[in-house]
Image: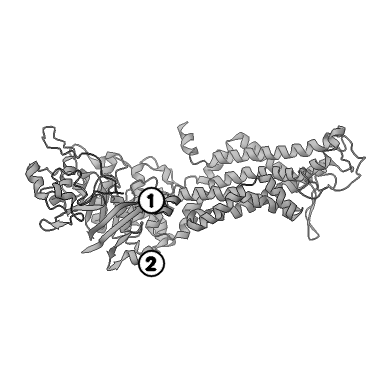
């Protein structure tokens, strides 16, 4: 069952808001999202991967309407979230939650943990009075903290503990979907594993769906049911984790996978090094946006009217590259 | 390139590393109970600051002296019967005019034979009241306007901030003088003049703070929880933006008292003959030439003492609520 479906989701930011630029009409747009189609199913973990600045966080925030999309729609329970009123959207937030990358800046330093977690309960009228306090204590214990921590302030906790507070707050309203925006990348490696295990346990217990935004593919391989690969504001490959991590590949996915550090020192992999950096999203390349760095690109890749669409290559697995078979013939199956 | 998946989907199990054996949860003994609130911690830091406490003691002492200088009557009923000042401030000829300090009149008498000690004690009422009331009204006008400008933005912001810019373009004292010249003299007119020129600094300060705080991730986090805008403003934005205003307001009490005294000295404050410190200086500046130093020195000292003390308090408040104060102290 589909929980959330995005259609043609687009988000453009103006660059300079200077008065003169606005007057002269030479405002430029950063195309953070360029027509993304995506669906998240009940109880699954969908990982969203890509380089820094490719629009992963923007997609996560636009899906929950923390940023207003420039165009496109997001459907949840048959309603288009982008056309809901502010009050209707507020009520809907009880089902759709968000865990931030930086647990320090996402917790208001002036409130105790109990107040921060309880705020969500108050807003949605989940529980009041004694019941509310009990629920806050339950939630803290659910995420591996102590009930007595409710009276402490965020600055008294370590990074991993703060992220647990962030997770408890998201869980408070009993959501269906939690968008986890790189929830572990600000944390120490040993703590990362614990937080990831906590997320896995919570998913099993409450049947949550996750949109797991990450740039660490070795983490993604363990936590995701499906993976969506993003490049410059567009999806280039979507599919079940095993399918994305094995041939056939999109050339960009292939390059990302070759960058995963391999623990075996005898492993002789062929690392694909992409030349240059990601082109500016203000002025993305024409045709396929990846053709400027693509190891298998041909002349015509830059001449298409638009970015190629995602085409199914079998089952759930879709790749946005008509020449994906060249990847195997160029780099070999193994 | 066939990669060997290192583990199954689900919980992480890494060979030679037991994720669950590591701890990120602090198992130190539970201190139990509520930890000190920010306000309590700020007070602890303030009370550890000797100069600030000394300033507070002087300010409180001046306040007590001013309140208990003469009895206060409200609608014919005496609510404050004490009289620390031996004479009423306006009573003339309590002794021969222009007497130097003596045991009977420790601060001497002025040209009209009024007791200077009584006038200095009583004058605190005017100066302190002007300082506190003008600053309170300035904060009351400046903070809401600045908060609205910062949070709403757009043309509202432009309109408010351009008005602030225009008022900033005038020298503070010149504008106050012009206002007093237009409205005339009197306590409330003086306060009004000081508020009109005083609120702009709060508006600018608060707007800047709000612009900073509303970009903070915890504000976005509250929106993600579905908290209504007005609760976000009241619970998260304003409390995090208000600290510099508290500091500024404390320091401003001194500035305003000084400005009121300056206006009084220029003859634009309260009516001549009022026992306000600035007016007393103004009325007696000619007698300074004749060697009657006591008539000007004592009100001048009172102004100096109060402004110095309130500045010490303001500095103490700033150090106490400085958000970095905690970590700096722990690093020591």
Identified at 83% across, 40% down, the residue is B284
Q: Is residue A14 left or right of residue B19?
A: right
* Residue B232 point in image, percent of width and height: 46, 56
Locate residue A331: give its quadrant: top left
Q: Is residue A138 left or right of residue B204?
A: left
Helix, strand or loop at label 2? It is loop
* Residue B201 point in image, percent of width and height: 59, 47
* Residue extending furthest toward the top: B332
Mark 2 burial class by Cα count in 10 Å: few <14, some 14-19, many 20+: few
Q: Nearer the viewer, mark 2 or mark 1?
A: 2
Q: CA distance from mark 2 to mark 1?
A: 37 Å
Query: Which labelled disc corresponds to residue A147?
Result: 1
* Residue extending furthest toward the right: B96
Q: Chain of mark 1?
A: A
Residue closer to the observer: A153 or B309: B309
Quarter holding the N terminus of chain A is bottom left
Count up the numbered dots.
2
Residue closer to the observer: A240 or A294: A294
Residue closer to the observer: B89 or A155: B89
Q: Which residue is mark 2?
A: A85
Q: How is the image coloured?
A: one colour
Q: Is residue B84 left or right of residue A202?
A: right
Mark 1 burial class by Cα count in 10 Å: few <14, some 14-19, many 20+: some
Helix, strand or loop at label 1? It is helix
Looking at marks 2 and 1 on the same chain, the residue that comes earlier in the sequence is marked by 2
Query: Which labelled disc corresponds to residue B209?
Result: none
**Residue A134 visible in image:** no
* Residue A160 point in image, percent of width and height: 33, 43
Locate residue A117: give its quadrant: bottom left
* Residue A130 point in image, percent of width and height: 43, 60
């Amino acid at each position: 069952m589909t929980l959330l479906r995005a259609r043609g989701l687009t988000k453009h930011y103006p660059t300079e808001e200077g008065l003169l630029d606005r007057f002269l009409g030479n405002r430029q747009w950063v195309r953070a999202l360029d027509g993304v189609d995506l669906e998240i199913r009940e109880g699954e973990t969908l990982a969203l991967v890509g380089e820094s600045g490719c629009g992963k966080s923007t997609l996560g925030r636009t899906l929950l309407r923390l940023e207003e999309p420039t165009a496109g729609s997001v459907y949840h329970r048959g309603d288009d979230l982008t056309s809901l009123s502010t009050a209707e959207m507020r009520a809907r937030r009880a089902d759709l939650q968000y865990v931030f990358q930086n647990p320090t800046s996402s917790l208001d330093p002036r409130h105790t943990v109990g107040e921060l977690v309880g705020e969500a309960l108050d807003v949605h009228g989940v529980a009041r009075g004694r019941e509310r306090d009990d629920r806050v204590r339950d939630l803290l214990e659910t995420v591996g903290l102590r009930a007595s921590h409710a009276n402490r302030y965020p600055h008294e906790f370590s990074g991993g503990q703060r992220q647990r507070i962030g997770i408890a707050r998201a869980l408070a309203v009993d959501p269906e979907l939690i968008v986890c925006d790189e929830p572990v990348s600000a944390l120490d490696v040993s703590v990362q594993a614990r937080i990831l295990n906590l997320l896995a346990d919570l998913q099993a217990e409450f049947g949550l769906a996750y949109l797991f935004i990450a740039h660490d593919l070795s983490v993604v391989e363990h936590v995701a049911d499906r993976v969506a690969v993003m490049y410059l504001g567009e999806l280039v490959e979507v599919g079940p984790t095993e399918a994305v991590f094995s041939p056939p590949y999109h050339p960009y996915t292939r390059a990302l996978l070759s960058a995963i550090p391999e623990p075996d020192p005898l492993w002789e992999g062929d690392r694909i090094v992409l030349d240059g950096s990601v082109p500016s999203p203000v002025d993305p390349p024409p045709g396929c946006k990846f053709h400027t760095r693509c190891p298998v690109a041909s002349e015509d890749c830059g001449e298409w009217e638009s970015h190629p669409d995602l085409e199914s290559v079998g089952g759930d697995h879709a790749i946005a590259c008509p020449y994906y078979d060249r990847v195997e013939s160029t780099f070999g199956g193994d | 390139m066939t990669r060997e998946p290192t583990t199954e989907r689900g919980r992480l199990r890494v060979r030679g590393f037991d994720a669950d054996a590591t701890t990120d949860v602090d198992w130190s003994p539970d201190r139990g109970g509520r930890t000190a609130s920010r306000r309590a911690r700020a007070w602890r830091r303030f009370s550890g600051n000797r100069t600030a406490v000394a300033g507070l003691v002087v300010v409180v002492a001046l306040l007590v002296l001013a309140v208990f200088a003469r009895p206060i009557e409200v609608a014919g009923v005496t609510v404050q019967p004490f009289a620390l000042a031996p004479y009423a401030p306006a009573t003339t000829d309590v002794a021969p005019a222009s007497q130097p300090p003596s045991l009977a009149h420790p601060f001497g008498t002025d040209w009209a034979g009024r007791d200077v000690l009584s006038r200095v004690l009583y004058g605190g009422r005017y100066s302190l009241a002007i300082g506190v009331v003008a600053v309170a009204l300035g904060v009351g006008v400046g903070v809401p306007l600045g908060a609205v400008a910062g949070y709403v933005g757009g043309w509202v912001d432009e309109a408010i901030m351009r008005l602030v810019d225009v008022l900033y373009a005038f020298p503070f004292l010149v504008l106050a003088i012009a206002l007093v010249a237009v409205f005339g003299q009197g306590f409330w007119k003086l306060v009004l003049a000081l508020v009109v020129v005083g609120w702009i600094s709060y508006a600018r300060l608060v707007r800047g703070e709000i612009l900073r705080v509303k970009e903070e991730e915890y504000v976005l986090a509250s929106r993600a929880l579905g908290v209504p805008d007005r609760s976000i403003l009241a619970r998260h934005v304003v409390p995090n933006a208000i600290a510099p205003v508290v500091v500024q307001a404390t320091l401003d009490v001194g500035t305003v008292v000084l400005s009121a005294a300056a206006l009084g000295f220029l003859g634009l404050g309260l009516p001549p003959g009022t026992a306000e410190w600035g007016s007393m200086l103004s009325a007696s500046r000619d007698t300074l030439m004749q060697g009657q130093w006591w008539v000007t020195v004592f009100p001048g000292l009172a102004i100096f003492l109060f402004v110095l003390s309130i500045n010490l308090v303001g500095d103490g408040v700033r150090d106490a609520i400085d958000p970095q104060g905690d970590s700096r102290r722990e690093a020591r």
